[in-house]
Amino acid sequence: MFRLRDAIHASSQPHPDDIFRTVFDRLAQGRLRTTVRAGVPLTELPAFLRSGAAGGGGKTLTTC
């Protein structure tokens, strides 16, 4: 899974503009994609997390 924080801290670039340029270039190339596993209404999120369904690969998006 891609995390912007990890990309910034791992970068040897001295200036934030250079760091973000690298991240945006990778984003434009499609290299920072992750799978969306589920969409869960916010009101159902606690039960979803307790159920263990959140484990495994992919993102869980909360919806209204």
Image: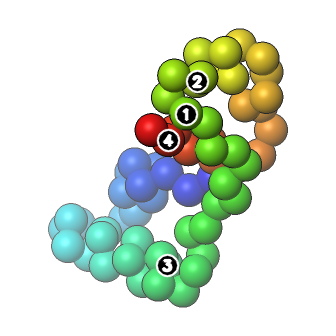
Circle 4 crowding by C-alpha within 10 Å: few under 14, some 14–19, many from 20:
few
Do labels 2 and 1 touch, CB within 8 Å?
yes
The residue to which callout 3 is attached is 26
- Residue 37 at x, y percent in the picture: 72, 49
Instruction: Look at label 1 and name its amino acid.
Output: Pro
Do labels 4 and 1 touch, CB within 8 Å?
yes
Q: CA distance from mark 3 to mark 2?
A: 31 Å
Mark yes or no: residue 22 visible: no
Name the residue: 56% across, 44% down: 61
Q: Which mark is residue 45?
A: 2
Q: CA distance from mark 4 to mark 2?
A: 9 Å
The residue to which callout 4 is attached is 63
Q: Which mark is residue 41?
A: 1
Determine which quarter of the picture holds residue 20: bottom left
Instruction: Look at label 4 and name its amino acid.
Output: Thr
In the picture, measured across the screen, residue 24 lies left or right of residue 43, that is left
Comes first in the chain, label 3 or label 4: 3
Q: Which mark is residue 21?
A: none
Identify which residue, 42 or 18, lies in the foreground.
42
- Residue 56 at x, y percent in the picture: 80, 38
Check the image and tell me how it is coloured: rainbow
